[in-house]
Image: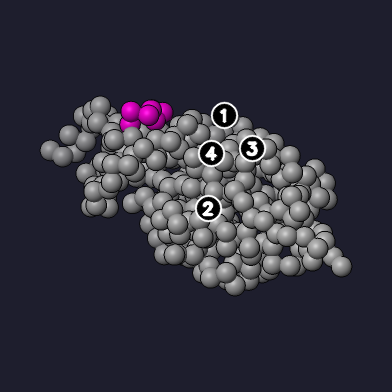
Amino acid sequence: MSAIEREEGKVRIRPMEPEDIDSVLAIDRKISGVRRAVTYTDLITGDLGGVLDLSFVAEVDGQVAGFILARRAYVGEPVTEVGLIQILGVDPDYWRQGIASKLVNALLDTCQSKKLNAVRIMVNERDSQLQGLFAHMGFRRGQLIDYTKTL
Amino acid sequence: MNAMEKGTVNIRRMGRSDIDAVLAIDRKVSGGQGLITYRDMVAADPGGALDLSFVSEVDGQVVGFILARLTYAGVPFIELAIIQAVVVDPDYQRRGMASRLVNALLGHCHAEGINTIRAVLDERNTELKHFFQRLGFRRSELINYTRTFES
């Protein structure tokens, strides 16, 4: 039964639009279980201008079920232009259907066609599941690490 | 008497009018065409809503800068300041200028309620790792996965 339902629910990947922000935040809330302040939406919307050309949502039957937010970053010497994945989120109700892979593939295709040099994501070194997903999609571990200060 | 001793250091927010001075310092440090492009600086939008960059001046002349911006990452989202570059004119290095720039950013983030400040760096760069450790940054569990496009 659920397999049939799954077949009926076609996954469609399309570029993110500013109107998607509420759906994106709803998925974020669903994953985190925390309702965030309304002003938060405004802040993120302010960031979307430079972000939308590399961001996608996944729709199942017209419902946003996942998203990938990425932006251009310039790094290294010689300077290379990379697509930096900031956030990848899939509604828990739609996990295990390959939606994350489809979102990443859409980003890879777009970055390649826009002549970017690479696509990068920072992941937790203990998150072997996420690392496995990206390794499977042709990503390799690099030498960048992160230093953080919490106030 | 060196340049620093006779001048007063002033740290202030970066603005659009600082772009030329910032690029000149970058070229001087890298000894060539520089690592940061004009395009990068326009994208950074100094003085804009998400920009957190500062410059340091000695006698009204810009001698160093920190490029930083407000961003959102992870699921659930967190709001964080990401440090993209800390650069000081070689004539003014080894005098704590870089630390003062980072501290200006930390103070601003504290006042604005931005509680996480992050720097992504190469794990082979021992000097830079020590610099951030001295300022209270600690290595997080984030590592990077990158897919590079052939051609």
Q: CA distance from mark 2 to mark 1?
A: 28 Å
Q: CA distance from mark 1 to mark 4?
A: 29 Å
Residue bearing the label numbered 2: B82
Residue bearing the label numbered 1: A113
Q: Residue at x 59, y 72 (%)?
A: B134
Dot 3: within a 10 Å radius of its alpha carbon, few (fewer than 14), some, or many (20 or more) residues?
A: few
The verdict on a common chain for dots 4 and 3 is yes
Q: Which mark is residue B48?
A: 4
Dot 1: within a 10 Å radius of its alpha carbon, few (fewer than 14), some, or many (20 or more) residues?
A: few
Q: CA distance from mark 2 to mark 3?
A: 19 Å
Residue positioned most to the left? A1
State which quarter of the image contains the C terminus of chain B: top right
* Residue type at numbered disc 1: Ser
User: In the rendered structure, the residue with mark 1 lies on which chain?
Assistant: A
Q: Residue at x 52, y 60 (%)?
A: B106
Residue extent of the magenta highlight = A13-20
User: In the rendered structure, the residue with mark 4 lies on which chain?
Assistant: B
Seen in the picture, residue B81 relative to A4 is either above or below; the reply is below
* Residue type at numbered disc 2: Ile
Callout 1: SS: helix
Q: Which mark is residue A55?
A: none
State the image coordinates of residue B124 (x, y, percent, origin top left): 66, 65
Counting residues from the N terminus, which is met first, the one under dot 4 or under dot 3?
3
Residue bearing the label numbered 3: B16
Q: CA distance from mark 4 to mark 3?
A: 9 Å
* Residue type at numbered disc 3: Arg
